């Protein structure tokens, strides 16, 4: 296939993705202007993912190949210093993100409450296959208390060497709560 033939196909795929996201926004009652108002970037789902990690219970977590390679290097470097990092979440589709929101709405939460802790479908870094929610033996659950762990302090001092960044620090401009567990690969 020539490059010229590929461009229309990529534009068509983007149009399909945006149409899907718009339909989800309408269904869930997410304001159409929310991404612009909060400075959120559209996160496309990658066409290829690899298993970034498999938990002992058999659960597989998917990432892009580059993010998986960087995660393995980061995790190994941490382990060499006695820090065990646990992958708690990685890739999730826009449809799965919508399902999480549906469940929360079903439990009586408002869309505004939900969107302080969850990105709207189409705008979660998890859709990119580059974001990882990280826990530790000290704090396997996702929560602000993760910032008090040796794992978080190690990440704060070393993650950038592996091209991972903390996405949502305190008082972030995106309107999300502080998420010391959420790190995103920014390489390539």
Image (tube, helix red, strand yellow):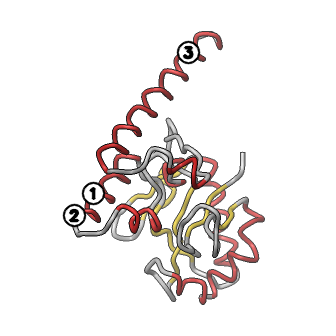
- How crowded pointer 1 is (Cα within 10 Å; few <14, some 14-19, many 20+) is rated as some
- Label 3 or label 1, whichever comes before in sequence order: 3
Dot 2 falls on a residue whose secondary structure is helix
Which of the image's four quarters has the N terminus? top right
* Residue 109 placement: quadrant: bottom left
- What separation in Å lies between label 3 and label 1 (alpha carbons)? 34 Å
Query: What residue did someone put label 3 on?
Result: 8
Dot 1 falls on a residue whose secondary structure is helix
Q: Position of residue 149 (x, y in %)?
A: 60, 88
- What separation in Å lies between label 1 and label 2 (alpha carbons)? 6 Å
- Label 2 or label 3, whichever comes before in sequence order: 3
Q: Which mark is residue 106?
A: 2
- How crowded pointer 3 is (Cα within 10 Å; few <14, some 14-19, many 20+) is rated as few
Q: Position of residue 147 (x, y in %)?
A: 60, 84
Answer left or right for 24 relative to 169.
left
Where 169 sits versus 153, above or below? above
| Depth check, front residue: 152 or 33 | 33
- For image coordinates 60% across by 89% down, the residue present is 148
| Depth check, front residue: 65 or 126 | 126
- For image coordinates 44% across by 62% down, the residue present is 115
- For image coordinates 29% across by 65% down, the residue present is 104
Q: Residue furthest left?
A: 106
- Marks 3/1 in contact by CB < 8 Å: the verdict is no
């Amino acid at each position: 296939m020539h490059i010229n033939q590929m461009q229309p196909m990529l534009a068509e795929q983007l149009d399909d993705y945006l149409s899907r996201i718009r339909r989800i926004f309408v269904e869930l009652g997410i304001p159409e202007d929310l991404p612009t108002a909060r400075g959120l970037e559209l996160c496309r789902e990658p066409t290829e993912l690899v298993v970034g990690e498999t938990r002992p219970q058999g659960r597989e977590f998917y990432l892009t190949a580059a993010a998986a390679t960087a995660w393995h290097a980061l995790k190994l470097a941490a382990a060499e210093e006695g820090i065990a990092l646990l992958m708690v979440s990685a890739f999730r589709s826009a449809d799965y993100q919508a399902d999480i929101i549906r469940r929360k709405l079903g439990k009586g939460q408002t869309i505004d409450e939900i969107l302080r802790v969850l990105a709207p479908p189409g705008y979660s870094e998890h859709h990119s296959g580059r974001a990882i929610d990280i826990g530790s033996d000290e704090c396997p659950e996702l929560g602000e208390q993760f910032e008090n762990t040796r794992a978080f302090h190690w990440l704060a001092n070393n993650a950038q060497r592996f091209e991972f960044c903390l996405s949502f620090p305190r008082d972030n401009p995106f309107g999300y709560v502080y998420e010391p567990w959420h790190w995103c690969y920014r390489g390539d």
